[in-house]
Amino acid sequence: MVRPPGTVSNVKAPTKLLGTLGGLALVGAAGVLTTRAVGERVRRSSDPALDDELARPTDVTHLELPTHDGGSLHVVEVPGEGRPVVLLHGVTLQWWVWSAVIRRLRGAHRVVAWDMRGHGRSRAGTDGVSLEAAATDLVTLLERLDLRDAVVVGHSMGGMVLGRFSVQHRDVMAERVAGRVFLATSAASLSIKGLSGGLVALAGAMASLSRAGLRNPRLVYGWKDTDLSLALIRPVFGRHATARMVEDVREMLSEVPAGTLAEAGASIASHDVSEELGAVEGPAMVVVGEEDRLTPPSHASALAGLLEGAELLRLPTVGHQVMQEAPDLLAAAIERFDADLAHGTVRVGDALAAEAGA
């Protein structure tokens, strides 16, 4: 039988479409199954001794400091006898991400941590959520609490704030900061001597998706307690992350306003102090997890190369969330850095790297 022209294509087209839809359905089903498997695996992971220390401390003093641009800065403080240690968290996080580290430093140090502007209980002023504005907030914190001879520890975006503070407020740094710890961070998000990492991609996605969400709130992902949320967050950690660590990050993410994500993402994406930071004198240490996918070890190496005399500490099996994954090693690094500052030497990186690899 001779078919009229076009009959063959009219029969095959629906068949081909059904085949394509079937293939997409299989891919989608596989994705759901994979996401569910990741979620179940995350929920089974635990470290009872460490997980208990991740709970936010309740015996801290809460302070509210006015910012230069009409906002407010939520700060927590734990009294101690030794050198002040100031903890600056990364984008989407809050002060209590440092809980396990605070427990290890308390008593021996006056420990101070903030909610960065636009995060937690801190409210951004007219300058928005930018690295420059947050660097000025650090000046406010140091001066209002009259902190001197402090060690400032900046994680991820907090480390970028520390870098921006170093180049824009050298007089305050010289007067009040004894040493800086750059933790899982970068001197330039886009590139350092041709090196790139995942943080700039994340920042760009945060900015674009959040702007879309501001136009249409239904587009904002709410970071609810689902397998998808856990699967999306899990790669931020190294191999030994527990359910408690991932859940804490999910909770903090769920509380970040879309506007904060948009402004912070744009500021991270344009961050670059690589030309200026090398001219800033002062003891510094750079710490990174070997399994950090957002600010990889290549960025830490380049950052350490910019800071004269800085030690570089690389932690095996640790990802981006060093303060949650390896609070013992991080607290020990800060303690040794403190001791070396007191004695006028900086040897902490090599010593702890040997311990971590043992």
Image (cartoon, rainbow, N blue to C red):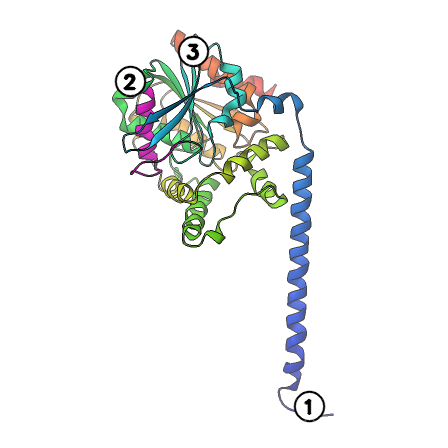
In-front residue for pair 167/264: 264
Neighbor class of circle 2 (other Cα within 10 Å; few <14, some 14-19, many 20+) is some
Q: Residue 145 location in percent, x, y?
A: 34, 17
User: Can residue 330 be seen at all in this image of the molecule?
Assistant: no
Q: Is mark 2 on a helix, strand or loop?
A: helix
Tag 2: residue type?
A: Ala
Position of 138 relative to 251 (above/below)? above
Q: Quadrant of the N terminus?
A: bottom right
Of circles 2 and 3, the one toward us is: 2
| Of pointers 2 and 3, the one earlier in the residue sequence | 2
Position of 267 relative to 80 (above/below)? below
Q: Name the residue under label 1.
A: 3
> Per the image, is 129 magenta?
yes
Tag 3: residue type?
A: Asp
Q: Mark 3 points at which residue?
A: 340
In-front residue for pair 202/225: 225
Q: Residue 345 location in percent, x, y?
A: 40, 11
Q: Residue 306 location in percent, x, y?
A: 36, 28
User: Can residue 97 be seen at all in this image of the molecule?
Assistant: yes
Neighbor class of circle 3 (other Cα within 10 Å; few <14, some 14-19, many 20+) is some
Tag 1: residue type?
A: Arg
Q: Quadrant of the C terminus?
A: top right
The answer to whether residue 114 is left or right of residue 136 is: right
Q: Mark 2 points at which residue?
A: 174
Q: Give the range drawn in magenta.
A: 122-143
| Of pointers 1 and 3, the one earlier in the residue sequence | 1
Question: Disc 2 to disc 3, how far (Cα)?
Answer: 18 Å
Image quadrant where residue 55 sits: top right
Q: What element carries label 1?
A: loop
> Per the image, is 297 magenta?
no
